[in-house]
Image (cartoon, rainbow, N blue to C red):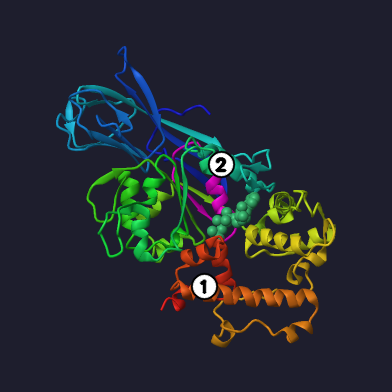
Amino acid sequence: MAPNEPYSAQSQPTKIAYINGDPKTVHIRRAQLIINPGAEDQREVIFDQNVIKIGALEDNDVVLDDETVSRNHCRIVQEDDHYVVIDQGSTNGTHINGVRIREAFLSPNVILCVGNTNIRFRPIDEQVAVEPSRTERLGNIVGRSVKMREIFDILSKIAPTAATVVIEGETGTGKEVVAQTIHQMSPRKDKPFIVFDCGAVPESLIESELFGHEKGSFTGAIMTRKGLFEMAQGGTIFLDELGELSIDLQPKLLRVLEQREVRRVGSNKPIPINVRVVAATNRSLEDEVKEGRFREDLFYRLSVVRLFLPALRERVEDIPLLVDHFLKHLDCNLDFDGERRLQSVQPEALAALMAYEWPGNVRELANAIERACSFAETDMLQLADLPDYIAGQRPRNVDSGPLDEDDQWSEIPAKAELKEQPFKEAKEQWISSFERDYIAELLSRHGGNISQAAREADIDRKYFRKLMTKYGIVADELSS
Ligand SMILES: Nc1ncnc2c1ncn2[C@@H]1O[C@H](COP(=O)(O)OP(=O)(O)OP(=O)(O)O)[C@@H](O)[C@H]1O
């Protein structure tokens, strides 16, 4: 991985080059700053972030002990294919070749005069081919398909950088587990990893959740509260369901990414933040931009690195490995002595698991294995332990749209009715009715607030939302 120098106008910011949908190369862009070049106290620093802040104050990326340097003197910003330096209204100015500048392009090896301190700027541009990794696991992600092993390789290359990442993929393809792995493989791993689901919090609360608020800034703000960006200081924030972020809030997020500072609701004081942003969406952000629902400038600022997670049906060869992974790690497969109850999978059952389409992807597979754990009577997962629609005995029937009103509030089936059916079907029908009523009532009680309802139910909000989709329950309809 030799750095290619000097960098040219064709250079790209850190990104993955895709050809025909396949990842081919990872471009990693870094900037090297040599402070006081040639002097005894020369020091070098390398940055891979979009914005490098320079000044006398401690919270700058480059802190200069020079009385002619202002507190926040200037910043170097990585733009599409170049870097610019922007003076921040400093007292003694930022100079290039003796000329005082307010904003200027930076060419390789140029010397910047910041107050009386010289800084040499050198871009480092690495272009590395993507090769499928040889391992079948990275952090908590397993996979042996070429696509997943290519993703492992990309992750190993981009995780240690500060690049913002957007992960795209259908529901349940593993976007959150990939985001966690990026955090775990980065120098930020000992700092917080904070998850925020843009689709699960009422729009009116998102701003204060993310950026915090001052006491009295709105009705109900009874005390000052830090936002999630502040809580993630030094670490990573994972913005899930980014496509759900309203168009009104998008400029606020853009400003945070560009300025690397937040302002709490009700305050004008900027708070510097050092947080890596990883975002996920199961909508195509490009389509959202075309439809005018997502700002183009935010899309470009965020998608420094874009990762596309394939649907499970496109990587069937991962299924045996995933099944084994779930049998080893799901708590429901442990008996009282901590031994695994299900040890192996009957070949016919594995064939059925590999033949099924998995619209809910890996999450649905994990749920199917979890369910099989409670049905299994031997230590081998059998075809009969799988739901019929997977075992291939009858077509699948998943509710995706809203149900009829009558249907939505149907009662749990009468005992007599259930007794006339085979045990397995009766049990499933009973569980479905229970789940539907439980979720709808709880949501109704919480005025349609999914996060609160999921918290009371003590279940993961994502799973809560899956159940809502499954039973066609719409939060808005329950919010009155
Ligand atoms: N490749 C994988 N290896 C191991 N576990 C996985 C993998 N992919 C997904 N999972 C597991 O499947 C479940 C769903 O994954 P996750 O929540 O990351 O999906 P998601 O794409 O973020 O879903 P959503 O779009 O609904 O937010 C989790 O329990 C996760 O640990």
Residue contact at pointers 2 and 1, CB within 8 angstroms: no
Identify which residue, 278 or 210, lies in the foreground. Answer: 210
Cβ of mark 2 under 8 Å from ligand 1: the answer is no
- Residue 193 drawn in magenta: no
Instruction: Give whichever of discs 2 and 1 has the lower sequence position.
Output: 2
Q: Residue at x 30, y 55 (%)?
A: 223
Residue 37 in the image: x percent, y percent?
31, 18
- Residue 179 drawn in magenta: yes
Which mark, by number, is residue 64?
none
Residue 295 in the image: x percent, y percent?
36, 59
The residue labelled by disc 1 is 442
Q: Residue at x 34, y 57 (%)?
A: 208
Q: Residues within 10 Å of mark 1 (few under 14, many from 20)?
A: some
Hey, what amino acid is under mark 2?
Ile
**Where are the magenta residues, as a range?**
160-181
Q: Residue at x 59, y 40 (%)?
A: 153
In the drawing, does residue 134 fall left or right of residue 263?
Answer: right
Task: Residue 291: name its quadrant.
Answer: bottom left
Q: Which quadrant: the C terminus?
A: bottom left
Q: Residues within 10 Å of mark 2 (few under 14, many from 20)?
A: many
Hey, what amino acid is under mark 1?
Leu
Q: Is residue 424 visible?
A: yes
Identify which residue, 332 or 325, lies in the foreground. Answer: 332
Identify which residue, 194 or 10, lies in the foreground. Answer: 194
In the drawing, does residue 27 fall left or right of residue 57?
Answer: right
Residue 298 in the image: x percent, y percent?
37, 54
* Rendered view: 294 above or below 271: below
Residue 344 in the image: x percent, y percent?
81, 53
Structural distance between the alpha carbons of marks 2 and 1 = 42 Å
Which mark, by number, is residue 154?
2
Per the image, label 2 sits on a secondary structure element best described as helix
